[in-house]
């Protein structure tokens, strides 16, 4: 965090999201969810959206990029896989596969407030049929600072956490859990 603040003091800097770290409460929720192990399919930018939304974001003119060689939709996919693996719910051979289209990716860091909206349309496919489809949105707002060295790292923290929160909403969704239930109906 301190290093990020030092970079922000130096003016425009290129910032990258760090690798996703599964949250303990997310792992517990996934383990106790009753869902089967999932494979993970394609994650891409929703149709009709500017390709730039998948490649970079900005906080007060400082570009924010996903980890090297990735896109934000790819970062969402990698975060999901990381959570599933850590919870013992990932299986490449599973008949259930989850895929998504990134539909919203907005970040604004004003002089007194910050806002973000991160959304995706998730689908679960089982044996070739869509058994779950839902748009999930994570939005957030916070008090910002006039001082860029405070506001930019703060925006980065909120933006990175939005991926965890978006996935937590997916995992908690009753329809998602029912569609991925490991118990026969």
Image (spheres, rainbow, N blue to C red):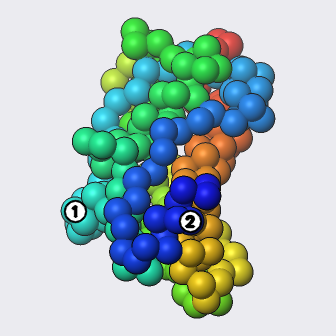
Q: Quadrant of the C terminus?
A: top right
| 45 shown above or below 63 | above
Q: Between residues 15 and 125, which one lies in front from this camera angle? A: 15
Mark 1 nearby-residue class (10 Å; few <14, some 14–19, many ≥20): few
How many labels were placed on the picture?
2
| 179 shown above or below 60 | above
In what element is the residue under mark 1?
helix
Numbered badge on residue 5: 2
On the picture, is 55 further left or further right than 82?
left
Estimate the x, y position of residue 42 in percent, counting from the top left: 31, 36
Q: Which circle, 2 or 1, is nearer the viewer?
A: 2
Numbered badge on residue 105: none
Mark 2 nearby-residue class (10 Å; few <14, some 14–19, many ≥20): some
At 69% from the left and 76% from the top, the residue drawn is 142
At 48% from the left and 28% from the top, the residue drawn is 81
Mark 2 and mark 1 residues within 8 Å of each other at the beta carbon: no
Q: Which mark sits nearer the N-terminus, 2 or 1?
A: 2
In what element is the residue under mark 2?
helix
At 70% from the left and 28% from the top, the residue drawn is 27
Residue 33 visible at all: no
Q: Between residues 143 and 100, which one lies in front from this camera angle? A: 143
Q: CA distance from mark 2 to mark 1?
A: 29 Å
Estimate the x, y position of residue 125 in percent, counting from the top left: 41, 29
At 54% from the left and 80% from the top, the residue drawn is 148
Q: Between residues 92 and 140, which one lies in front from this camera angle? A: 140
Q: Mark 1 highlights which residue?
A: 51
Residue 47 visible at all: yes
On the picture, is 109 further left or further right than 102?
right
């Amino acid at each position: 965090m301190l290093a990020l603040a030092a970079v922000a003091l130096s003016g425009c800097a290129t910032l990258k999201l760090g690798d996703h770290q599964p949250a303990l409460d997310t792992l517990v929720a996934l383990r106790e969810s009753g869902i089967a192990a999932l494979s993970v399919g394609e994650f891409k930018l929703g149709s009709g959206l500017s390709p730039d939304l998948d490649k970079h974001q900005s906080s007060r003119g400082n570009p924010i990029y996903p980890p090297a060689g990735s896109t934000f939709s790819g970062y969402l996919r990698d975060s999901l896989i990381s959570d599933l693996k850590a919870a013992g719910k990932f299986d490449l051979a599973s008949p259930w596969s989850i895929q998504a289209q990134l539909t919203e990716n907005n970040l604004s860091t004003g002089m007194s407030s910050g806002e973000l909206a991160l959304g995706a349309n998730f689908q679960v496919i089982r044996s070739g049929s869509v058994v779950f489809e839902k748009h999930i949105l994570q939005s957030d707002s916070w008090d910002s600072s006039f001082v860029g060295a405070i506001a930019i790292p703060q925006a980065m923290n909120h933006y990175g956490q939005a991926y965890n929160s978006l996935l937590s909403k997916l995992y908690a969704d009753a329809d998602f859990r029912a569609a991925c239930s490991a118990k026969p109906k």
